[in-house]
Image (tube, coloured by chain):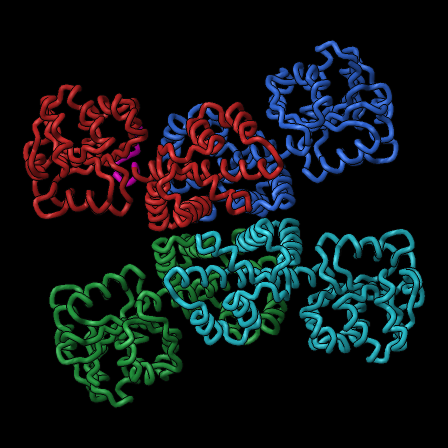
Chain colours: A red, B blue, C cyan, D green
Amino acid sequence: MNVGFIGLGRMGKGMARCILEGEHDLAVYDVVREATAEFATAGARVASSVAEVCKESDVVITMLVEDATVLDVALGAGGMRDSLPPGAIHLAMGTYGVGTIRTLADAHAKAKQTLVAAPVLGRPDLAASGQLGIVAAGPIDGLRRCRPLFEVIGRRTFEAGEKPEAATAIKLANNLVLGAAIVAQGEAFSLVRKYGVAPQVLYDVMTDGLFAGAPAYKGYGKTMVDETYDKVGSPVLVGIKDANLILAAADLARVPLPMLDIYRERLLGAIAHGDGDKDQAVLAREQARACGLE
Amino acid sequence: MNVGFIGLGRMGKGMARCILEGEHDLAVYDVVREATAEFATAGARVASSVAEVCKESDVVITMLVEDATVLDVALGAGGMRDSLPPGAIHLAMGTYGVGTIRTLADAHAKAKQTLVAAPVLGRPDLAASGQLGIVAAGPIDGLRRCRPLFEVIGRRTFEAGEKPEAATAIKLANNLVLGAAIVAQGEAFSLVRKYGVAPQVLYDVMTDGLFAGAPAYKGYGKTMVDETYDKVGSPVLVGIKDANLILAAADLARVPLPMLDIYRERLLGAIAHGDGDKDQAVLAREQARACGLE
Amino acid sequence: MNVGFIGLGRMGKGMARCILEGEHDLAVYDVVREATAEFATAGARVASSVAEVCKESDVVITMLVEDATVLDVALGAGGMRDSLPPGAIHLAMGTYGVGTIRTLADAHAKAKQTLVAAPVLGRPDLAASGQLGIVAAGPIDGLRRCRPLFEVIGRRTFEAGEKPEAATAIKLANNLVLGAAIVAQGEAFSLVRKYGVAPQVLYDVMTDGLFAGAPAYKGYGKTMVDETYDKVGSPVLVGIKDANLILAAADLARVPLPMLDIYRERLLGAIAHGDGDKDQAVLAREQARACGLE
Amino acid sequence: MNVGFIGLGRMGKGMARCILEGEHDLAVYDVVREATAEFATAGARVASSVAEVCKESDVVITMLVEDATVLDVALGAGGMRDSLPPGAIHLAMGTYGVGTIRTLADAHAKAKQTLVAAPVLGRPDLAASGQLGIVAAGPIDGLRRCRPLFEVIGRRTFEAGEKPEAATAIKLANNLVLGAAIVAQGEAFSLVRKYGVAPQVLYDVMTDGLFAGAPAYKGYGKTMVDETYDKVGSPVLVGIKDANLILAAADLARVPLPMLDIYRERLLGAIAHGDGDKDQAVLAREQARACGLE
């Protein structure tokens, strides 16, 4: 398969590597030229424009951070819509908003192209080792054709139906559950601290019982216990971006989500207090502030 | 050790059994006479009053559901305070409010007795097999003397310091985190359903990744997917009781807990809609109602 | 009419005066002896016990701050239940919880006495001038017999039916609306301050338009603009007491009240930050803290 | 003064009339041609394009509903930026988002034009009678030049400083306080209904005391009592539009606003339940649903 890849950031780099090692023909593009160097060495074709990546590809993957960027790359003059051959697939693997996915799906459909949305679960280390989770949705034939790529990029694929936005909804819903778990742990630590309890004891209880094994507790909880908010996995400023995507998806679908509101407000508070660059576990400190512990 | 046990309900029965099998001398009491029959057969002494259980015991365990009941059993006329020998221990293993624990601790201290609070984690099956988690707090010497009992009742003990109420705070904080996880899953399922996603797919994503392994997701999430709210693990009406204990603890310690509020409100809504006897996973239906899905 | 009055605090003093001036025979009682002195001079009979006040009265008014106090005065040994003649009325004019009102109503009914609940609206200055609002509920005949007293105590009476707790519910509901108005103003001031607006301008807009004339905005808003939180009308610690009464009433009736939750949390936060004795307008400062403005 | 007016909807029509009666030279434009007919008769010049309105005007007022519309009218090809003479003023009197106001202010400044933001307070009847409230902000000289217009359009002008977005912030903050008042009344009515109270009694209490005189209670409260949600002042779908503008303003300024969240969620719920076209007082029904009363 001829595969194009746009967006060689921390996540994209690892994913593109996996594709190359999967013995697909790969063309890569990134606005940051240096990002492509290692791929030239490794046997990929380095394109000098979006159009060039698209021209002869069966599938072009985008792995870009911002909705505005993917919209521009896809729909701007000389972008993917203008350059992908009829029948080709835009495989959008970043986490974009439902509105963006709808816009892309419509635009590609009009150009006889196919949008498959397949946001990923996992951080750069999993991307590098081909161990990501993938949530994929799009037209049946499109999904079928993308499967060989999912196999080299990911550990497991969750297929979510024919509408690309369904994959987005799942990714966002999963993030919502995570956000709530972070805030709830923060509340719990505040409560026990007020009763003179060492946070480590609550951590031991949580991770031994109902929440045993779950990275969402093992990881964020530990950071809260150690207050090592400067070791950043996912920063507050990324959290608020995701929270706003969830909010927009909920708004479109008319779904009241009170837990999301609490998560968003704590994120805003953290940013207002200068903690925007800290790990999201810092929401525990935001909670502590609210009850006079900081 | 001479051990007394008051409250042979679904949890207490299993715990008392473990003590008996641990080769301690056991005296049991329950207002429901039938509950004691099997213990007579098994070699325990069946007492006919609280006072009789207490008279010659080193440690008397209470495993009663309501705060009002334990207060009456402990502080009523002829109760534990009046009957326990000086130096004996009241080991309170139910989940009671912080206020109740404070009252008990003070009253026993005045009577030269010791209160150890040790609420347990786990359901009747774990109680029967001696696999409960135990969160214990109280005076150092009291804790030390209770350890042999913890060893036969539980799988692991988490010690939380010298103030009995600290154990309560931890148990309640853990419940708070659970409540938030239940509500958050309900929100997540509503969101994806509005986008036409089969709930099972979100469940697969959640339990494969960030929340893998955790009973709080594996169990409640599955019940939400299958909508088998009539198979009740922990009912809504127990949830609201616990939520109100958390609320009272937070009130005493001046801790705002917005996630708790959401959890409480959803519980109240479920009761108002006639779902009080259903499993707490039914909060997903409450959420679905809020967004017009039911 | 022979009237008894128990509780000559800041509110009760003014109310009792109005009754005396209304040419009723008045017996007064207060645990603080000094509080009764002025009434002796003014022609009231000063009783030395609750029982003595009750013995020959047709109606005995209680105006006590705490639920525990009114329960003790009414139901304790030698209290109102034991001392009021059959057919006499306990007219409870403090703001008590629904549970307390139910307990009192049942107990008096069993003793062939009548409970009328009639919480008042307004502060000590209005009490002194007989200008209070009165929300009254109780058996029809009881209400009828109390009307002459309402006429001298209040400016206007709102009758709410035959169940005393209905009056309580209305008083609490009105307080809930007030609490929300206070918090909302705090949020609004925070928002405009972040945009560089002088709070006074927002105050002018609010009190000129949609909220013109309403004391809830004119008063609390002004205190927020001037930040004169030390001039205390209604302190935070009274606010939390009322909020908890509303919460309990909502819990009994299974009514989720998210706005109440926000109000309560802000009150708790204010207390945690040391502002418990300040005027409730200080919730604006609590809000400002939450967004990094303090 | 030569004045242009774009947007002759229910509000704009009345405002433009006032300007004409104020003896200014008026040119009008609306995409709906019929809307201009009455103005031709009354002596205004009817322009056939945005550009034509702008060409010879000192001040051009826009009174358009959507942010997207005002952005297009102002910044689209042949729009206000391209057509207003240097030194002329774009007086934006609709309620637009902070982001939109910033964009307009920057664009006009670059074109040597001035943006004054002056959102209005009041409904079409007040617009027709020149009795609106006006919140105005912008460069000092711009404000000064607009004052003669404010005098004929409004009853009172609140000046909020030199940054146009400050006026927006005030308008939005005022709406936030209103939204909270609506929701709080809904909660209060639910609470008392559960206690068997006729809503009218609570209404009488509210509008007699703390909230006396305020249209926000007199109007919305009455609609709730009568459940006349089909007589629409401000519909839910306008409410959610405004709530989202407030949310965006709070997001930009990093201000957590929990009351706004409750208001938004109730609006979303109402839309999900099919009440989007009803008056916002219908949030009381949404609240009633949440507690099993509907």
Left or right of residue B281: residue B133? right
Q: Is residue B69 above or below residue C198?
A: above
At x 33%, y 49%, the residue is A248
Does residue D211 appear in this view? no
Q: Position of residue B112 (x, y in %)?
A: 83, 28
At x 45%, y 62%, the residue is C188
Is A166 colored magenta in this rendering? Answer: yes
Does residue B87 appear in this view? yes
Out of C115 and B99, give the one closest to the viewer.
Answer: B99
Left or right of residue C98: residue D186? left
Q: Which quadrant of the view contains residue B170?
A: top right
Left or right of residue C51: residue A9? left
Q: Which image quarter is the N terminus of chain D in?
A: bottom left
Q: Position of residue B171 (x, y in %)?
A: 61, 31
Is A12 colored magenta in this rendering? Answer: no
Q: Position of residue C239 (x, y in %)?
A: 63, 58
Q: Which quadrant of the view contains residue D12?
A: bottom left
Tell me which segment is drawn in magenta.
Answer: A158-167
At x 42%, y 55%, the residue is D264
Out of A194 and B148, give the one closest to the viewer.
Answer: A194
Left or right of residue B96: residue B192? left
Q: Is residue B67 above or below residue B265?
A: above
Q: Is residue C139 above or below residue D256?
A: below
Q: Position of residue A220 (x, y in %)?
A: 44, 32
